[in-house]
C-alpha cells in the first residue's frame, strides 16, 4: 500500500507547472455534498487497522494503518485501490474528529441534565434509589 504517488522531480519550476494560488481557490474545486460525520465515524470504526511494511523495506520497519484495498472498499473515493490519497485520509480524520466532538458535547449536556435532575430530587427529599428487599 502506498499513501501517495511519487511525482517525478523536474528542474523546471516555471509558472506553468502549477496553477496560481488564485486559480486553486476560485474554480479548481467543486463542492459535491454534505458529509454525515457519524456515518464516516462508523465506517472508520469498522475499518481493519494493522501494522504492515512495504516489501522493499527491511523487516524491522512497520507502518500503522488500513490497507488501501480496505480503504477503497469502505470509501471508494478514488479509482485506485492501491493508494490512499493523503487529502482523503486527512478529510476522513477531520470529519471523525468533528463527529466525536459533537458526541462528547451531547453526552456532556446529558450528564449535566441528569446531575440537575438528581440534585433537584435530593433537595426535595425525593431520592429515587432502589430499595433492597430482604
Image (cartoon, rainbow, N blue to C red):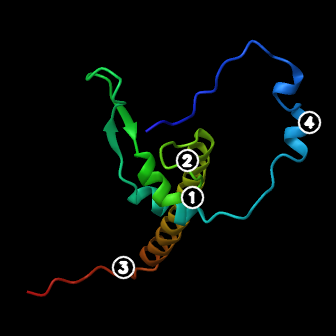
Q: Nearer the viewer, mark 2 or mark 3?
A: 2
Q: Nearer the viewer, mark 3 or mark 1?
A: 1
Calculate the distance from the C-alpha at mark 1 to the C-alpha at mark 4. Answer: 31 Å
Calculate the distance from the C-alpha at mark 2 to the C-alpha at mark 3. Answer: 44 Å
Residue 24 lies, with reference to residue 105, above or below; the image says above
| First in sequence: mark 1 vs mark 2 | 2
Q: Which of marks 2 and 4 is in front?
A: 4
Calculate the distance from the C-alpha at mark 2 to the C-alpha at mark 4. Answer: 27 Å
Q: Specify the farthest residue to the top.
A: 11
Residue at left offset 75%, top offset 12%: 11
Residue 125 located left or right of residue 35 = left
User: At which x and y percent is residue 85?
Assistant: 58, 42
Which residue in the structure is indicated by mark 3? 127
| First in sequence: mark 2 vs mark 3 | 2
**Quarter of the figure with the C terminus:** bottom left
Calculate the distance from the C-alpha at mark 1 to the C-alpha at mark 2. Answer: 10 Å
Residue toward you, 17 or 65: 17
| First in sequence: mark 2 vs mark 4 | 4
User: At which x and y percent is residue 127?
Assistant: 36, 79
Residue 109 located left or right of residue 9 = left
Residue at left offset 30%, top offset 20%: 58
Amino acid at each position: 500500500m502506498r499513501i501517495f504517488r511519487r511525482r517525478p522531480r523536474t528542474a523546471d519550476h516555471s509558472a506553468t507547472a502549477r496553477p496560481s494560488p488564485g486559480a486553486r481557490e476560485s474554480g479548481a474545486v467543486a463542492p459535491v455534498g454534505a458529509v454525515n460525520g457519524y456515518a464516516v465515524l462508523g465506517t472508520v470504526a469498522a475499518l481493519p487497522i494493522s501494522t504492515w511494511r512495504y516489501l522493499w523495506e527491511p523487516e524491522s520497519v512497520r507502518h500503522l494503518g488500513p490497507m488501501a484495498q480496505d480503504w477503497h472498499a469502505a470509501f471508494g473515493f478514488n479509482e485506485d485501490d492501491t493508494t490512499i490519497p493523503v487529502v482523503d485520509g486527512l478529510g476522513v480524520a477531520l470529519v471523525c474528529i468533528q463527529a466525536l466532538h459533537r458526541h462528547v458535547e451531547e453526552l456532556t449536556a446529558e450528564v449535566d441534565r441528569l446531575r440537575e435532575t438528581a440534585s433537584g430530587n435530593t433537595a426535595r427529599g425525593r431520592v429515587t434509589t432502589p430499595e433492597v428487599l430482604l
